[in-house]
Amino acid sequence: MSIKNCLLPAIAAASIVVASAQAQTTPPATPEAKPAETAAPAPPPPIFSIWGFDLTGHVDVGYSYLSGAGKFVSGANDRVFDYKHDSVYFHALDLTFTNTPDNGWGGLVDVTIGKDADAIAAYGTISKSKGPANGANHYVDPTQFYVYYGAAPFSIIAGKYVTNAGAEVIKSDGDTNYSRSILFGYAIPFTHTGVRATYKVNDALTVLGGVNEGWDAFESPSHNATVELGGTFTPTKTVSIVASYYGGKELVTNYPKSAAKGTRNLFDIVGTFNATDQLTFILNYDYGDQEQAAANGGKAKWQGIAGYANYQINDQWRLSLRGEYFDDKDGYRTGVVQKWKEATLTLAYLPAKEWEIRAEVRVDRSDQSAFLKSDSVTPTSNQHSAGVEVLYKF
């Protein structure tokens, strides 16, 4: 059963009370911040505050060159945001107003303006009311908006918010590489709309639970709810583990809207080890399945693993290495039955706390001729790329 009617009063209140943010700006009691962020520098203080709400955000521009067309032979993009062969991107202007106290009412709204908004927009919002097939480009996305109530060690949010799964986040200033991981784009959702409660059991353990409208949906096209369970375990100052589960009925495809639907499950775990003050290791594993999505009408399955090594050379330089393996066993997530690997090396320069410049090289390989070459016709089993990204944080 849909939870839309339960959320309308809370969402209406959110539009009055709040105005903007995402995972890395939420309070410690709401475990939306991802482990990959631990290697990123702290953002500068807010540039504006009013009635307890802080304005923060960033500007993200980049250039990316791909040896291929940026698409699989299935026609699906093979990157999340930087999917063109040779292009300059205005990725995002992110604007965030947030007030999430330990005790009392607050809220959050996060608006993404730019090219990235089209990729992350949820089903049922204005930007995705007709789906990508309408040929329009949408440059504004209400990425998050929710009412918040805190009564430490308990907190609850109601509205639209980012997923708890994965090591990487939508906001570029919360990641350490330019391009997003395979797992971020193809294994997990971006956002949910619903209600999420979080309880800090003690300094080592935080748990959460919720009910939402499913994957990347403001209003579930399947008219079924998805259950969310998760927790963060920090046994020592150097080790943390974040686990998440999502389960509920989803349409096999939203665009075009499929008549077939079945239970979709996702298990996600992220482990972080801060070896030293400068060196951090992160490991992310995902397993997912969707009923009625395999070629024979059975259950489609996918799984993948990503590893990160982030080294803060000094206050101004950081080196980040990422390696991944993704098994799209039934071709449900990419449109190609394949085993896909990638390796990414990123060098970041931080001349001031507001500025970050990243230079990246990446190599992707598949066990199938899954990618299209730059002529958009010829299949190939590999693709390489280079990119430069400039972030201004405020």
Image (cartoon, rainbow, N blue to C red):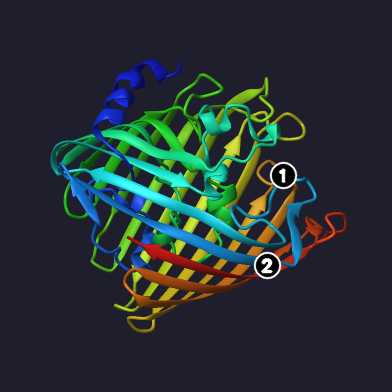
Q: Which disc number belongs to residue 67?
A: none
Q: Residue 88: horizontal and vertical position, in percent?
A: 62, 62
The residue that label 1 is drawn on is 331
Question: Measuring 24% from the left and 32% from the top, which residue is drawn there?
Answer: 17
Give the percent coordinates (x, y) of residue 182: 59, 56
Examine the rendered structure and indicate whether residue 163 appears above or below residue 324. above
Image point 62% across, 24% down: which residue?
261
Dot 2 alpha-carbon crowd within 10 angstroms: few under 14, some 14 to 19, many 20 or more: many
Query: Is 268 in front, or is 46?
Result: 46
Residue at image point 23% right, 51% down: 28
Q: Is residue 152 visible?
A: no
SS of the residue under disc 2 = strand
Closer to the camera in the image, 3 or 20:
20
Nearest to the eye among marks 1 and 2: give it. Answer: 2
Residue for badge 2: 65
Is residue 83 shown above or below 111? below
| Residue 57 found in image quarter | bottom left
Residue type indicated by callout 2 = Tyr
Q: Residue at x 54, y 57 (%)?
A: 90
Q: Is residue 90 visible?
A: yes
Q: In which quadrant is the N terminus drawn?
A: top left
Is 333 left or right of 194, judged from the image as shown? right
Q: Name the side, left or right, on which 385 lies relative to 143.
A: right
